[in-house]
Image (cartoon, grey):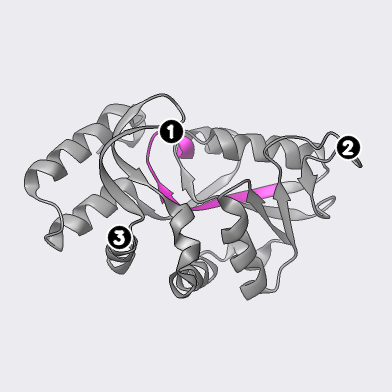
Amino acid sequence: MSWLPIELYRHGVIKFGRFKLTSGLDSPYYIDLRRLYSYPKLAKRIALEIIERFSVVEEADAVVGVATAGIPLATYIAVLSEKPLAYIRSERKAHGMESLVEGDVAGRKTVIVDDVATTGGSIERAWNALVSAGSKPVAAIVIVDREQGAREKLSGLGLKFFSLVTAREIFHELRKAGIIDEFLLKELIEYVDKYAPSASKP
C-alpha cells in the first residue's frame, strides 16, 4: 500500500535522525504514531483499512487497545466496526477493582491492537493479561511492524499477527517517491537487517 508511508511521512509520523528507543537501542528512524490522532481523517482511513483488510476484526467479539498509543486506534476500529472495546492498562490499578484489563472480555475472542510492534513485548504482556481475564486473544494488529522479532514472538504464543506495513516497505516506498535518497535507504535497510530475526531476513 504505497499511500500509507507517504501519508505518514507527510504528517510528521516518520522521522529520520538519531533516536533512543525504549529498548535502549539507537535507531536512525522514529515512528511517532501518537501524532496520528491529530489528523482524524487519516486515522479514520487507517482504521477502515485495517477493518477491510483483516477479516479477524469482524470475526472477533471485542477489540482491545494496548496503553497508551494502541487505545485511540482500537477505539476508531471498535466504533467503525461496531465491536465492543476494552483496553490494557500500562499498570494495574491500585484502587477499586485493581484491574489491568478494562472492559468485558471474559469468554470473548479478542483482537489486540497497538500502533507499532518492535519486539512484541507489549503485545505479549497484553496477551497474558487477557488470558488471565478469561479471554481468548486470537490476533494482534499494528499499523507498522519494525521487523525486530514481534512476529516470531507472537507466533510462539499462537497469536496471528497482522501489520498494514513493515519498516522495509516504508523505506522502499519513500525512496520510490524521492523522499529519501539511496544512501539513507541503504542505512535504514542495514539497520532493519541487523536487528531482524534471522528467519525474517530476505
Tell me, yes or no, whether the two marked residues, 1 and 2, touch with CB atoms within 8 Å.
no
Residue type at mark 3: give it. Pro
Q: Which residues are magenta?
A: 137-151
Q: Residue 67, relative to residue 27: is it above or below?
A: below
In space, the residues marked 1 and 3 are separated at their CA atoms by 21 Å
Q: Which residue is mark 3?
A: 5
- C-alpha span from label 1 to label 2: 35 Å
Counting residues from the N terminus, which is met first, the one under dot 1 or under dot 2?
Answer: 2
Location of the N terminus (image quadrant) = bottom left
The local secondary structure at tag 2 comes to loop
| Most distant residue in the top direction | 24
Instruction: Please rate how many residues cluster around mark 1, counting C-alpha atoms within 10 Å: few if below 14, some from 14 to 19, many from 20.
Output: many
Q: Closer to the camera: disc 3 or disc 2?
A: 2
Q: Which residue is mark 2?
A: 95
**Residue at label 1?**
149
State which quarter of the image contains the C terminus. top left
Dot 3 crowding, Cα within 10 Å, few <14, some 14–19, many 20+? many
Query: Magenta includes 141?
Result: yes
Label 2: few (<14), some (14–19) or many (≥20) C-alpha neighbours in 10 Å: few
Badge 3 element: helix
Q: Judge left or right: residue 182 versus residue 84.
A: left
The residue under the point 32% across, 52% down is 14
Q: Residue 113: in sight, yes or no?
A: no
Magenta span: chief secondary structure: strand
Q: Is residue 41 above or below residue 91?
A: below
Q: At x 52% / y 64%, what residue is drawn?
A: 54
Is there a contact, CB below 8 Å, between mark 1 and mark 3? no
The label number, if any, that marks residue 50 in the structure image: none
Does the magenta segment cover residue 24? no
